Amino acid sequence: MTLTGSYTFPEHLPAWPRRRMHHVFAPDGRAVVAALDAGLKYGVKPGLGDARAAVRRLVDGGIDAVLAGIGFARATAGELGGRGLILALDSEIPSAGYGVEQAVRYGADALELKVFPGNPDRTVLGELRELAAEADRWGMPLMAEPIPVSFANTEAHTVTNVANGARISAEAGADFVKAQYVGTVEEFAGVVSSCPVPLLALGGPVKPTPRHALQLAHDAVAAGARGVVYGRNIVEAERPDLMVEALVEIVHGGASVDAAAKHLNVAL
């Protein structure tokens, strides 16, 4: 897999949000993002007990950006330095009324909101539309994470439903999308091509081995994804810095899984 050239974000984005997007995505338009927002729901999680040390490891590995809640972001700002920051706004209450201004105040480069297309109780799609309009007024890019129905209802996580969720999110105003990798490379290529904004593949649960995590990243990029957003598959790795290095080799360098795996001095 050979990657060439640079990437220009869509011209509909004014200069300021495009500049912020370039804090998340490298000049090639690709990104390796670490999801560090688990504490918003679960508190202390493996690999994130010492927040500052966790971020230092990721920066050492060459991470492009992190996804985090406001408290985590404030606590680790010194370690994060110039890496991109996506502020997670998932909450029990709608966040459009406070989230964008908060992100601007703390120097975030983008916002994130999870939505659940097909959920009969709360899709969150109305909140996404409202947040997209408010973010647009502030020049703040917005990433949506559409999960069909719910995390628990895995039967709903079909290729068709993931594709529809990504498209619905883009239609609602998201500037880029974080979506589940589903199906074959060819099937996921259809998910990517039907989404009119950049798409990043999420890592999901911890994979059986580090090699499985690298394979997902390789296949997602081969299908046209602009990179990955990995949480547990990075922070719970034996060496998170080396896992980031391996993912960077795949996402930015077009490396094979075998070549990238050489960065890991752990059992595959």
Image (cartoon, rainbow, N blue to C red):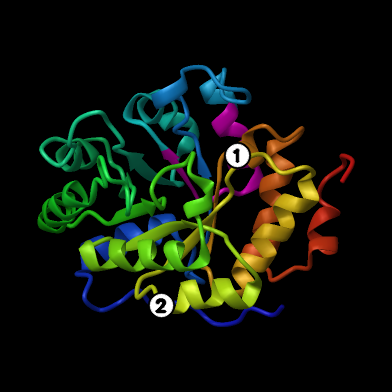
The residue depicted at 15 percent of the width and 42 percent of the height is 96
Residue 260 appears at what percent x and percent y? 78, 58
Left or right of 239 in this view: 113: left
Q: Residues within 10 Å of mark 2 (few under 14, many from 20)?
A: few
Compared with 49, 221 (above or below) is below
* Looking at the image, residue 215 lies above or below residue 112: below
User: Which mark, residue 95?
Assistant: none
Q: Amino acid at mark 2?
A: Ser
Q: Secondary structure at mark 2?
A: loop
Q: Which residues are magenta?
A: 54-67
- For mark 1, what is the residue? 58
At 42% across and 55% down in the image, what residue appears? Answer: 24
> Is 72 displayed left or right of 208 in the figure?
left
Which image quadrant: the N terminus? bottom right
Name the residue: 30% across, 61% down. Answer: 169
Check residue 194 in the rendering and tell me which mark sits there, or answer none.
2
Magenta stretch: residue 161 in it? no
